[in-house]
């Protein structure tokens, strides 16, 4: 388990901007107001995360985290530009593989809605056909 964490942390060393995930990942930005328990439950009950190429970014006012690893300031600024334009009542923002904001959510716990939204996306439909 420890080795996996090291490899995972090292895989994000060269990430400077959210656009580094273009065409590779769907990014779910989660505001810091979400409790760790909610994030843990999200992962536990969301076996569809890897299948849908979702990367979860924890956003805090002064930093962004991936797998509890602080990201570079330039990455955080690119996330801030997106999250600051979204109404504060939303706790999560889904960014598509094309880099566009696809949906905002009031709760991270509604994974069925989130997965349904993703599964309706044209790129996701192609992915499902090719698997």
Image (cartoon, rainbow, N blue to C red):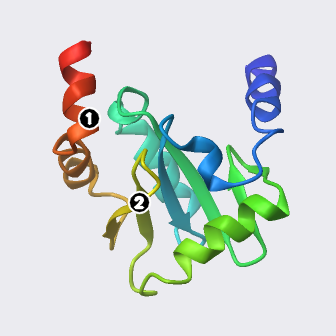
> Which mark is drawn over residue 42?
none
Looking at the image, the residue that sits furthest to the top is 131
Residue 20 location (% of width, % of height): 65, 44
Image vertical order of residue 47 relative to residue 120, above or below: above
Image vertical order of residue 95 relative to residue 92, above or below: above
Residue 99 location (% of width, % of height): 47, 54
Instruction: Look at 42% across and 48% down and name the residue there.
Output: 98
In depth, the one of 43 and 26 nearer the eye is: 26
Could you say whether the residue bearing mark 1 is in a helix, strand or loop?
Answer: helix
**Badge 2 or badge 1: first in the primary sequence:** 2
> Which mark is drawn over residue 124?
1
In depth, the one of 10 and 68 nearer the eye is: 10
Image vertical order of residue 80 relative to residue 69, above or below: below
Residue 114 location (% of width, % of height): 27, 52
Residue 27 location (% of width, % of height): 49, 50
Instruction: Look at 43% across and 29% down and name the residue there.
Output: 50
Image vertical order of residue 121 relative to residue 103, above or below: above
Distance between mark 2 and mark 1 Cα atoms: 14 Å
Could you say whether the residue bearing mark 2 is in a helix, strand or loop?
Answer: loop
Instruction: Look at 73% across and 29% down and name the residue there.
Output: 8
Instruction: Look at 76% across and 30% down and name the residue there.
Output: 11
Which image quadrant is residue 4 in?
Answer: top right
Q: Is residue 21 left or right of residue 12?
A: left
């Amino acid at each position: 388990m420890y080795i996996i964490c090291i490899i995972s942390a090292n895989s994000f060393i060269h990430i400077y901007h959210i656009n580094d995930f273009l065409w590779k990942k769907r990014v779910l930005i989660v505001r810091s107001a979400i409790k760790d328990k909610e994030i843990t439950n999200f992962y536990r009950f969301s076996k569809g995360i890897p299948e849908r190429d979702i990367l979860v970014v924890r956003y805090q006012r002064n930093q962004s985290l991936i797998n509890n690893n602080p990201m570079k300031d330039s990455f955080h600024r690119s996330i801030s530009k997106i999250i600051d334009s979204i109404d504060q009542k939303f706790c999560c923002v889904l960014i598509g593989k094309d880099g566009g904001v696809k949906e905002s959510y009031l709760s991270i716990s509604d994974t069925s809605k989130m997965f349904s939204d993703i599964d309706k996306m044209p790129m996701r439909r192609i992915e499902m056909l090719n698997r």
